[in-house]
Amino acid sequence: MKRCIIWVAALTLPLSAENLFRNGNMDTVGGWKGASKITTDESDEKGAKKPASIPGGGKPAEANRFLQVTAKLREPVVFSQEVNTKGLTDVMIKFRYRTKDYVGRGLEIRGIRASRDFTFISRTFVKDGEWHEMTWDFTKIMGSRNIDFIFSVLEGTGVVDFDDITVEPIIRH
């Protein structure tokens, strides 16, 4: 019986991947470095919380918190986090974004290894004010113990929101 339980537990481990980023759901301001702010849909333009109003009274649901980046015309706006990748070969970065007014060159994500060499991707944003999912299989850890993942909203104007940013080990069988 004991062997059976251990075997079943071992089968479920790869299915419950751990997010290697700290604060990927933006519950607090911790974990992220760079030019960005944590806000909610219920915040006004200055970041102050708007009073909640619910028809018929009642308690409002907890507001969704997300990271908000305002693009700059002459330079990218960068936020980043270092991840411990010891013993890993591949990871998947996954997140949601939304924008309704960003005009610019898009997004660049770099994975910088301890040796300072890097791998990157460039993506464009859908501009409709709806949340969209983006993923990247980062398969170039190359034995590095830490990878610094740097998100750059490239030169432009407008605002881009990011939420539920995860980096999870890819388990290959």
Image (cartoon, rainbow, N blue to C red):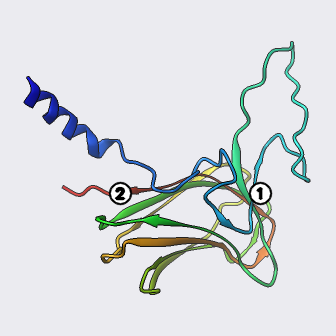
Task: Give the mark, 2 or 1, whose residue is nearer the N terminus.
Answer: 1
Question: Is 58 situated above or below 145?
Answer: above
Q: Is residue 136 left or right of residue 47?
A: left
Q: Quadrant of residue 142?
A: bottom left
Image coordinates for residue 65, horizontal then vertical, percent: 70, 44
In the rendered image, the residue lying farthest to the top is 56
Question: Is 137 situated above or below 105?
Answer: above
Q: Mark 1 = which residue?
A: 100
Numbered tag placed on residue 156 in the rendering: none
| Residue in the foreground of this view, choosing between 94 and 8 | 8
Q: Mark 2 = which residue?
A: 169
C-alpha span from label 2 to label 1: 32 Å
Question: Which residue lies at the image location 10% right of the left edge and 26% below the top edge?
Answer: 2
Q: Count up the numbered dots.
A: 2
Quadrant (top left, top right, bottom left, bottom right) of the C terminus: bottom left
Question: Which residue lies at the image location 61% right of the left edge and 58% below the top edge?
Answer: 31
